[in-house]
Amino acid sequence: MCDEEEETTSHLFLNCPFAIAVWHGSILEIRTSELNLNTAKQWLLHCITTSRHLEQYRIYLQSLFTILWSIWNHRNLVLHQGKVPNPIEVVLTSHSLICRYREAFQQNQEQKINTSQKKLQTVSNQNWQVLIKVAAHRNRRSKRCGFAFEAIKLNGGTLFKGGANSGRHSQYMAAQEALVEAILKAKDLGFCRIIIMSNNRRQV
């Protein structure tokens, strides 16, 4: 972006009376007239780097860019549809969008927490007998795979473990081979209620 374009962008989003009024009246209450930074790009980079310590960093950035978008959208309506410039309308519109985002973000976080709690509750409520951990690895040079497994009892003690090189060229298939062998060992020892953990995403 050339100097002239940067100057125009800074004037549009930060320094013109309309933008100054919007930022001052926005939910962030920023006084752009007091900024010492030369361009809008420098200001945005400054905001991003200095706000990382904030607890609600993601929401702050979303608010920042929502206000920028609202200014840009209103400007287009003024230029192309003859709308009368109204900074209060931009402030109210951006505020409404920011509140909606915060509600959606909060609901999403609550859903994640509830889902995690339900999963934990489901596991803890079952009378599991043994935990089997399965891992597979593919050697880049030989392009062959190996696997390992370990069965752990509820008290934390190791029930059995094993591992071997596999003729499989697929890490997933090697993990499957390890899983089958470990489950058969557990079944032979009389264990039926088993939790499986694996380092292979596809297998999980």
Image (cartoon, grey):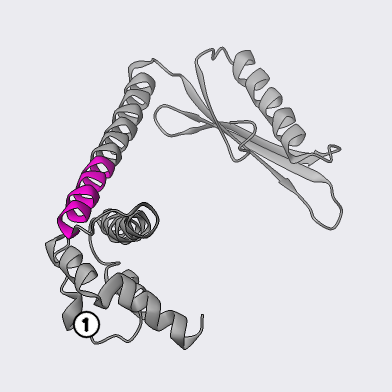
Q: Up-down: is 141 above or below 162?
A: below
Q: Residues within 10 Å of mark 1 (few under 14, many from 20)?
A: few
Residue 180: which quarter of the image?
top right
- Inspect the magenta stretch and tell me whether residue 138 lies in it: no
**Can I make out residue 172 in this image?**
yes
Residue 7: which quarter of the image?
bottom left
Image position of 55 (left or right of 46): left
> Residue at (67%, 36%) from the top-left corner?
162
Residue at label 1? 35
Quadrant for the C terminus, please.
Answer: top right
**Camera-side residue of 147 and 49:** 49
Q: Main secondary structure of the magenta part?
A: helix
Callout 1 amino acid: Leu
> Residue at (23%, 38%) from the top-left corner?
103
**Camera-side residue of 131 and 56:** 56
Residue 28 coordinates in the image, percent (x, y): 17, 62
- Inspect the magenta stretch and tell me whether residue 91 lies in it: yes
Image position of 117 (left or right of 17): right
**Can I make out residue 41 in this image?**
no
> Residue at (35%, 31%) from the top-left corner?
116
Residue 55 coordinates in the image, percent (x, y): 22, 58
> Residue at (86%, 38%) from the top-left corner?
167
Q: Pick out the residue farthest to the front.
A: 82
Residue 185 coordinates in the image, percent (x, y): 65, 21
Image position of 191 (left or right of 143): left
Residue 92 coordinates in the image, percent (x, y): 17, 49
Residue 48: which quarter of the image?
bottom left
Q: Up-down: is 33 above or below 172?
A: below
**Camera-side residue of 121 and 11:** 11
Q: Magenta span covers which residues? A: 87-102
Q: Element at badge 1? A: loop
Q: Up-down: is 53 above or below 190?
A: below
